[in-house]
Amino acid sequence: MVVRVLVTVLALAALALAVTGLVLRPVERLIEGKQAEVVALVGDIEELQSRVALLNQSGRGFAFPPELGYEDESRDQAGLKLQSAVVDRAQMAGVVPESYGIVASDISVERPTIAVEIDAEAELSAVVGFLASLEHNEPRLAVGSLSIRRAMGGYDQAESAPRVFVQAVIWSYTGTND
């Protein structure tokens, strides 16, 4: 009888340990994972704080660097340079503009801006290449609006890619309101 009680007690103790291990082990793993996430986030916060401190030490603060736009030029000259840059990048990507021109810039930022509108029909891959190339322009360019739709006729079975019509307004900063 005593042996039976001892065996039952030992069995219950083993069962309790097994259940505790099954419940606690996943919770421990979850806690360890969350602790690792906290450590990574603290590292990210420290890195961002050091970047902000570096910007503040540079004396520039958060002002726009001059190389972001077409500076030291009249608005007309800046517009023509922007137009030339956009058309050149389009042609290099295989996008032949149907029409393009300087348009009124309605971008609302703290500096004057200039804008060019371009309309073209091309293969979708060429349009994607053109848009990607805009990121590498100096001075910097931004897309103010973009519309892409299937071109009339849409997809020629002989061609490997669909043709699309693209209309985009590309803008940049300028240093003058003239």
Image (tube, rainbow, N blue to C red):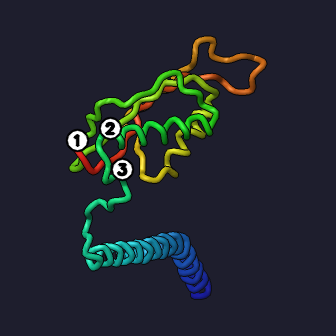
Q: CA distance from mark 2 to mark 1?
A: 8 Å
* Depicted 80 relative to depicted 162: above or below: below
On-image quarter of the N terminus: bottom right
Q: Amino acid at mark 2?
A: Asp
Q: Secondary structure at mark 1?
A: loop
- Position in image of residue 85 (x %, y %): 49, 42
107 sits left or right of 6 in the view: left
What residue lies at 65% left-to-right and 23% top-to-bottom?
A: 162
State the residue lying farthest toward the right. 158
Marks counted in the figure total 3
Q: Secondary structure at mark 2?
A: helix
Residues tagged 1 and 3 counted as in contact (Cβ below 8 A): no
Please name whichever residue, 59 or 158, is drawn nearer the observer in this view of the structure: 59
Whether residue 172 can be seen here: yes
Q: Amino acid at mark 3?
A: Tyr
* Depicted 123 relative to depicted 31: above or below: above
Circle 2 crowding by C-alpha within 10 Å: few under 14, some 14–19, many from 20: some
Whether residue 147 can be seen here: no
Identify the residue under disc 1: 178
N-term-proximal mark, 2 vs 3:
3
What residue lies at 37% left-to-right and 55% top-to-bottom?
A: 68
Identify the residue under disc 3: 70
N-term-proximal mark, 1 vs 3:
3
N-term-proximal mark, 2 vs 1:
2
Identify the residue under disc 2: 76
